[in-house]
């Protein structure tokens, strides 16, 4: 009994695994912990900075385990073992990058998400970075959310109407403090809603 409580206490400790490359087999997180997976693609580092801030925001909610991976590193165990997923992409030609689209396609080709709808009722959210103002960030986030909705996930936003985003070129190079704050707010909201759902399930 005491040993069981100690294990539960340990699992409740906040874990932020930034730049993880390998994690053992994941099981569905216990009721006193939620797991938020932040998955992103980034070539020149902008989307990665947003991802790190999303992770920090999610970690602010006690009892939340946060995992940060590139989309190519995500395994079925990581995906299905998480209560929430936040996906970030650079804008490529006014849409998500090919790497992020391939990530969603792998859900079926590699992970077999359908017909059981294994992502059903998990919380989902999106973030994006784009070089120019009004050149595809909202569409990029919406197509990410559309893939999640098609998988019967519960999508949420914060930062902007569709998620957190940043303009990275021209007069607004890189990621500024307001954009980082939006990313943190998104991560925090995702963890809050994931907790609401988890608590609701335990009733
Ligand atoms: C192939 C390609 C296409 C792009 N298309 C767009 C675009 O349509 N709209 C836009 O605002 N930025 C576009 N960009 C700029 C990137 O979205 C922007 O630099 C982004 O912040 C890069 O993210 P990263 O640093 O995480 O790789 C494009 C960049 C590349 C390489």
Image (tube, rainbow, N blue to C red):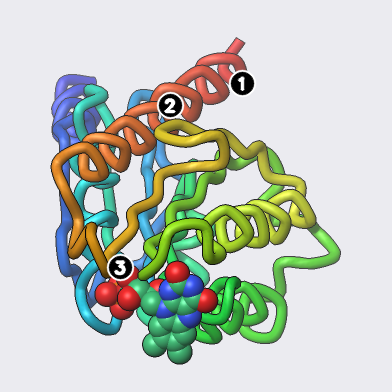
Asked which secondary structure carries label 2, the reply is loop
Mark with earlier residue (3, 2): 2
Where is mark 2, residue-wise? 31
Image quadrant where one finds the C terminus: top right
Circles 1, 2 touching at the beta carbon (< 8 Å):
yes
Q: CA distance from mark 3 to mark 2?
A: 23 Å
Report the disc number at residue 85.
none
In the image as oriented, which residue stretches furthest toward the right? Answer: 115
Residue occupying the point 62% across, 39% down:
155
Instruction: From this view, report whether residue 61 is shown above or below residue 174.
Output: above
Mark with earlier residue (3, 1): 3
Where is mark 3, residue-wise? 69
- Residue 99, given in percent of the width and then of the height, sits at 49, 84
| Left or right relative to 78: residue 65 | left
> In front here: 58 or 118?
58
- Residue 168, given in percent of the width and then of the height, sits at 27, 64
Where is mark 1, residue-wise? 201
Residue occupying the point 38% across, 45% down:
36
Asked which secondary structure carries label 3, the reply is strand
Q: Residues within 10 Å of mark 1 (few under 14, many from 20)?
A: few
- Residue 80, given in percent of the width and then of the height, sits at 54, 57
Circles 3, 2 touching at the beta carbon (< 8 Å):
no
């Amino acid at each position: 009994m005491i040993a069981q409580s100690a294990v539960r206490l340990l699992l409740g400790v906040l874990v932020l695994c930034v730049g993880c490359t390998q994690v053992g087999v994941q099981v569905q997180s216990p009721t006193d912990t939620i797991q938020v997976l932040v998955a992103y693609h980034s070539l020149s580092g902008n989307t990665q900075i947003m991802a790190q801030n999303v992770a920090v925001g999610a970690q602010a909610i006690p009892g939340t385990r946060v995992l940060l991976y590139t989309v190519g590193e995500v395994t079925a165990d990581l995906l299905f073992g998480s209560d929430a997923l936040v996906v970030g992409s650079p804008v490529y030609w006014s849409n998500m990058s090919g790497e992020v689209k391939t990530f969603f396609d792998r859900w079926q080709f590699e992970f077999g998400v359908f017909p059981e709808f294994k992502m059903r009722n998990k919380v989902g959210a999106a973030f994006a970075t784009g070089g120019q103002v009004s050149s595809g960030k909202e569409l990029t986030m919406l197509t990410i959310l559309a893939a999640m909705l098609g998988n019967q996930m519960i999508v949420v936003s914060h930062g902007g109407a569709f998620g957190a985003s940043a303009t990275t070129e021209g007069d607004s190079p890189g990621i500024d403090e307001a954009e980082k704050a939006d990313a943190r707010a998104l991560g925090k909201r995702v963890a809050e809603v994931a907790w609401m759902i988890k608590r609701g399930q335990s009733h």
